[in-house]
Every structure is written in C-alpha cells, then in structure tokens.
Image (cartoon, rainbow, N blue to C red):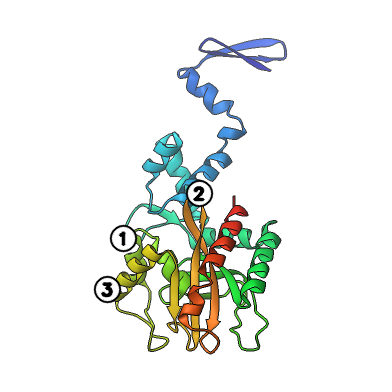
C-alpha cells in the first residue's frame, strides 16, 4: 500500500511506514500514473497517425511538437517502430517515412474492412450504369494497386484481380495520384523507378510526364489512351478523404467499343460514385 504527500511517497508494509523524498514529484506522478490515453501504445499510434497523414518525411522533433510529447520519448518510439518495420528512413535523409510494410497493412485493412461490401455495391451500380469494368485503386509504394474491381459482361475485357499492381506513371489512376503529390516527392518517385515503354504511346521522358501531370491536375481526372495496354482507354477520378486524395475510381474501355469522347462522357457519373465511396472511408 502506498500514498502520496507533498514531495514524498509513503509506503506502508506490514504496518510499518516508510517515507522517501522525490526530487521531481510532478514528473514521478506523470510517469507512474499514466492512463490508457498516455500509454506507450497510444503514443506509438499517435506517431503512426501523424506519419500516415504527412505528405513528406518527418523528423522525431516535428512529431514531438505536433503531439506535444517529450522529444526523447518520441525519438525512442520512432526508432522502435523502425526496428519492427513500420517506419523507415527517407533515402539520403535521417527523417522518417512510412514503410512498405505499414502501407501494405493499411491497404489490407481497407480491402477487408466492414465497409468492403458497401464499396463493392457502389462499383456494381456504376458498372450496371456504364456497362464497362470499374475499379477502386490506391497508391502502394511506387505502384497503383487495385483495391476492388467489378467486371463488365462484355466478352472482350481486361482481367485484373483485386491486389494486382500496375505502374504509376502510365495509367489513368497513377497519373492522377502523381498529379496531387508535392512536386519534390513526385520527382523522387519518377527518378527512382524504371520508366518502361509498354506501347508507342507510353511517355517515359520526365519533362513530358511533368507537363502531362500539370494538365491532369487542372482537369482533375486521369486519362490513359493506350499508354499501358494497346486498345485500352483508362479514365480515373479522385476519391477524397479529409480533403486529400486517397484513391481513385477508374474505368477501362476498349477502343473498339468507344472513342475518347464517349469515354470522357462517363466522368460525371464516376465522380458521383467516388463521392459515395469517400463516405465509406470516414
């Protein structure tokens, strides 16, 4: 049994009282009576939340300032999160970024979340309306991953399963996601990956890609005209969460069935679906 008096801790053992002085009494109370809201786990979760919301690499100092926590504690926790593979260092920097392992965890959580059926139903409704294959995509490292997909009933279609990944620089969804990134982050990604020419329409020159991405951001939709696959048009519109792009609703249209203008006419209905899907992410 123990109880506190001013600047002292009194311990009672077997009827005897033992009194000891405490130098930093307030610190002792804070460190030894912390509740769930200030536990090590809650601090770690706060760090991961801040990291996942950031658009650039962060230092432990900036995180400690955001969370109003001791710098040493935050730095120690971030090192531990790095050891278990949830954080990693930005190449050429001491700052931290989320790891591929954490990103995959977030994606798998989203793919298998309770709202999965609701999002799938929205996609099914869109496919029934447009009669073309529709997808939900998100960023996964330096690729675009298909989170969900509903195929059209046409015999001629592209078969890609949820979980499939495609290059970020030459598809409608990837171009749209890149266009929303800070310029420095986007350039780092484009310079770090192999830019392969899949068709004669694939753009692999960095300057030309940047010009195209600026146009994409202004139009607020991604367009891929046979850049990734021959005979396929891709269109993507953004899905937002907390006013930030977090994914896209995209559509694949064979050129034998529709022209580019026909495909662009689908955008308003795709935006409605994207807004409905965004509500399932809150």
Total residue callouts: 3
| Residue bearing the label numbered 3 | 207
Q: Nearer the viewer, residue 207 or 19?
A: 207
**Residue at the farthest left position:** 207
Q: Are marks 1 and 3 in contact (CB under 8 Å)?
A: no
Q: Give the CA distance from mark 2 to mark 1.
A: 22 Å
Q: Give the CA distance from mark 3 to mark 2.
A: 31 Å
Question: Where residue 25 sits in the image (x, y, percent)?
Answer: 49, 18
- In percent of the image, x 43 and y 51: which residue is there? 54
Residue 277 vs 195, above or below: the answer is above
- Answer with the quarter of the image where residue 3 lies: top right
Residue density around tag 1, few if under 14, some if 14–19, many if 20 or more, within 10 Å: few
Residue 278 vs 46, above or below: the answer is below
Question: Where residue 135 sits in the image (x, y, percent)?
Answer: 58, 71
Residue 242's disc number: 2
Residue 184's disc number: 1
Say left or right for 185 vs 38: left
Give the mark, 1 or 3, whose residue is nearer the N terminus.
Answer: 1
Question: Where residue 24 sits in the image (x, y, percent)?
Answer: 46, 19
Residue 215's disc number: none
Give the mark, 2 or 1, whose residue is nearer the N terminus.
Answer: 1
Q: Give the CA distance from mark 1 to mark 3.
A: 14 Å
């Amino acid at each position: 049994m123990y109880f506190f008096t001013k600047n002292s801790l009194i311990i009672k053992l077997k009827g005897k009282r033992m009194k000891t002085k405490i130098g930093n009494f307030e610190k002792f109370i804070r460190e030894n009576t912390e509740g769930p809201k200030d536990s090590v786990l809650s601090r770690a979760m706060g760090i991961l939340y801040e990291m996942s919301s950031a658009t650039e690499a962060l230092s432990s100092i900036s995180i400690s300032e955001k969370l109003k926590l001791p710098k040493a504690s935050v730095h120690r926790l971030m090192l531990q999160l790095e050891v278990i593979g949830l954080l990693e260092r930005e190449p050429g920097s001491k700052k931290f970024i989320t790891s591929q392992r954490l990103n995959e965890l977030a994606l798998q959580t989203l793919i298998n979340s309770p709202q999965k059926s609701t999002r799938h139903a929205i996609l099914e409704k869109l496919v029934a309306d447009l009669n073309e294959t529709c997808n939900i995509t998100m960023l996964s490292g330096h690729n675009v991953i298909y989170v969900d997909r509903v195929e059209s009933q046409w015999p001629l279609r592209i078969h890609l399963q949820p979980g499939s990944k495609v290059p970020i620089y030459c598809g409608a969804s990837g171009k749209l996601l890149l266009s929303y990134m800070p310029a420095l982050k986007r350039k780092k990604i484009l310079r770090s990956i192999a830019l392969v020419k899949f068709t004669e329409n694939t753009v692999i020159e960095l300057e030309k890609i940047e010009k195209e991405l600026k146009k994409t951001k202004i139009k607020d939709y991604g367009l891929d005209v046979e850049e990734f696959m021959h005979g396929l048009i891709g269109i993507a519109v953004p899905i937002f969460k907390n006013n930030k792009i977090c994914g896209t609703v995209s559509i694949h249209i064979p050129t034998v069935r529709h022209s580019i203008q026909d495909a662009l006419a689908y955008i308003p209905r795709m935006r409605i679906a994207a807004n409905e899907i965004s509500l399932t992410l809150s």
